[in-house]
Amino acid sequence: MNTPSTTANAPLPLTEAQIEQDILQLGKQAKAAALQLALLSSDDKNKILLAMAAGIRAASDDILAANALDIAAGEAKGLSSAMLDRLRLDTNRLEGIASGVEQVANLPDPTNEIMDEWDRPNGIHIQQLRVPIGVIGIIYESRPNVTSDAAALCFKSGNATILRGGSEAIHSNKALAKALQAGGEQAGLPKAAIQLIENTDRASVKYMAQMDQYLDLIIPRGGKGLIETVVSLARMPVIKHYDGICHLYVDAAADLDMAVKITVDAKTQKPSVCNALETLLVDESVAPIFLPLVEKALKAKGVELRADEASQTYLAAGTATATEEDWQTEYLELILAVKTVANIDEAIDHINTYSSKHSDCIITQDEAQVQRFMTEIDAACLFHNVSTRFSDGEEFGFGAEIGISTDKLHARGPMGLKELTSYQYRITGNGQTKS
């Protein structure tokens, strides 16, 4: 959370040249910090992480006061209810943030793990060792918890990190950064291991994405526009996901009570997140019974349905008609697209056509159908008889996650500590030469 003095002393607004200079300075500092991180033991890292969590709790009043400023500004700007929910902190959420940092401290350190080793006929010994990626840049929007999640995960996996949050959460991010830094310093947090860009000018994104001499990886978390911007500008590898268009298919052999329960949870437990359900597919053989049941349960939670013509037959009069756009939309609010399909073939075809490759689910008691779904659907996470809301690093046992990747290289799905590492080969001999 160190910001170069040029930013602190310069009058606002900064010129692009000043912004570029400051970003480059952050990069230089992070590269140097990455070397210092390599000297820390696992015990050192864990003590620092626990001190960071304590720092968050000690500064809770300041953090919540700062968040109130962001919420007030967001309301004045007319941010959507989904965006405001992502932004909002309260006592419980703040405790969850601190607990998330502690969870990371309690997880195994992935660095220096021997992934494989073997001897060659000529006597040389080869080890494949897990190592940090180096310097990671995180660009994110309205979720202030990303500040602590990213700081904790990158630090534990031995990476220096540069954080760039959105303007809508700037007060919250500054307060969290200050608390993490103050707590961590007491336990030996290296200078510039974790840095926050306090300038919210969009030019800072551009200069981060072009700083390949210092950044080894960049991870954008936020809306599709932000991610597309970063991808178009980045000179280093990017790990991302564009959308969370998650599907749930109720098969002919589904337990319908279970299907209702899971559908309601996946859609309404927290609709503003990327693993919330957006499209419900129902086998036509169970649609006459299931759709009225699930409609009643969903409407009790305030969900608006948008259904195809076949589904409307079994739903209340006046149900909105789903359009092509609805199958392609990540609502992030209490709206659900509904479609009746002839069979699992049509369900698989629909999902592979419209899925964002995030998380998709089948509800069935037929193991043959499960195997088809798991084999034929191309997504990072596939669920059988369980809510898509479990597509989450903490739920997977990873601790606080850095994000969910819908890429296939180098990480896929919820990203924890191991996904923030690479590997190197270390070769030992006793004088062998090639000639």
Image: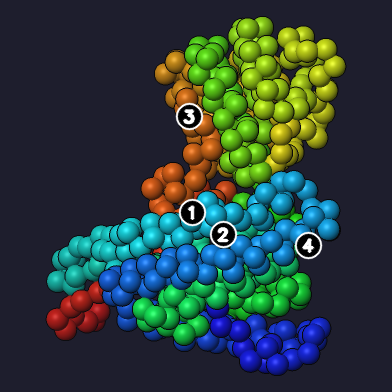
Of mark 2 and mark 3, the one earlier in the sequence is 2
Quadrant showing the N terminus: bottom right
- Circle 2 — which element? helix
Of mark 1 and mark 3, the one earlier in the sequence is 1
* In-image side of 422 versus 205 (left or right): left
**How far across and down, in percent of the image, does residue 176 sit?**
56, 69
Mark 4 — residue? 73
Residues tagged 4 and 1 counted as in contact (Cβ below 8 A): no
Of mark 4 and mark 1, the one earlier in the sequence is 4
Mark 3 — residue? 386
Residues tagged 2 and 1 counted as in contact (Cβ below 8 A): yes
Can residue 419 be seen in this snapshot? no
- Circle 1 — which element? helix
Of mark 4 and mark 2, the one earlier in the sequence is 4
Mark 2 — residue? 145
**How far across and down, in percent of the image, does residue 196 sit?**
59, 75
Q: Which amino acid is tagged 2? A: Asn
Of mark 2 and mark 1, the one earlier in the sequence is 1
Residues tagged 4 and 2 counted as in contact (Cβ below 8 A): no
Give the alpha-carbon distance from disc 2 to disc 1, as whole Å: 9 Å
Q: Residue at x 72, y 65 (%)?
A: 69
Foreground mark, 4 or 2? 4
The foreground one among 51 and 4 is 51
Foreground mark, 4 or 3? 4
Q: Is residue 27 above or below residue 158?
A: below
Foreground mark, 2 or 1? 1
Q: Which amino acid is tagged 4? A: Ala
**How far across and down, in percent of the image, does residue 308 sit?**
77, 20
* In-image side of 153 versus 2 (left or right): left
Query: For mark 2, does the 10 Å Cα neighbourhood hold few (<14), some (14 to 19), or many (20 or more) residues?
Result: many
Mark 1 — residue? 96
